[in-house]
Amino acid sequence: MIGFPVFPDHDEPGRQGHGEAATRASVESALHAAGDLDAREIVVSTLGADIVLEGFVRRNGDVERAAEIAESIVGRGHVHNRLLRR
């Protein structure tokens, strides 16, 4: 697991705005720091309390790996994975 902050209560009512930006930035950082994933074409956005991954990856397994990394930060069930493999 990568050493990035976890936001288990990221959907708390008072944490919108800056909290969403911080969560998105943490996911982006974790994706780009992963040595086994090319995240150059991955776009991370928020949808309420959830994270949305969109864009493209190149290798088999990278779609799942990106979701695992995001879930390690925001929790299982809070990632909408719309990544496509080229």
Image (cartoon, rainbow, N blue to C red):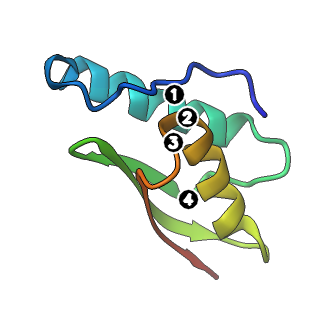
Image quadrant in which the C terminus is located: bottom right
Q: Measure how far apart labels 1 and 4 are at the Cα level.
A: 17 Å
Q: Nearer the viewer, mark 2 or mark 1?
A: 2
- Residue at image position (41%, 29%) is 23
Q: Which structural element holds mark 3? A: loop
Residue underneath mark 1: 26
Q: Measure how far apart labels 2 and 4 are at the Cα level.
A: 20 Å
Q: Nearer the viewer, mark 4 or mark 3?
A: 3
The residue type indicated by label 4 comes to Glu
Residue underneath mark 3: 75
Q: Measure how far apart labels 4 and 3 are at the Cα level.
A: 23 Å
CB of mark 2 within 8 Å of CB of mark 3?
yes
Quadrant of the image occupied by residue 13: top left
Q: Which structural element holds mark 1? A: helix
CB of mark 1 within 8 Å of CB of mark 4?
no
CB of mark 1 within 8 Å of CB of mark 3?
no
Image quadrant in which the N terminus is located: top right
Q: Measure how far apart labels 2 and 3 are at the Cα level.
A: 6 Å
Is residue 6 left or right of 37 when viewed as pictured? left
The picture places residue 46, in percent across and down from the top left corner, at: 29, 45
Q: Residues within 10 Å of mark 2 (few under 14, many from 20)?
A: many
- Residue at image position (84%, 51%) is 36
The picture places residue 45, in percent across and down from the top left corner, at: 34, 47
The residue type indicated by label 1 comes to Ser
Residue underneath mark 2: 73
The picture places residue 49, in percent across and down from the top left corner, at: 28, 41
Residue underneath mark 4: 41
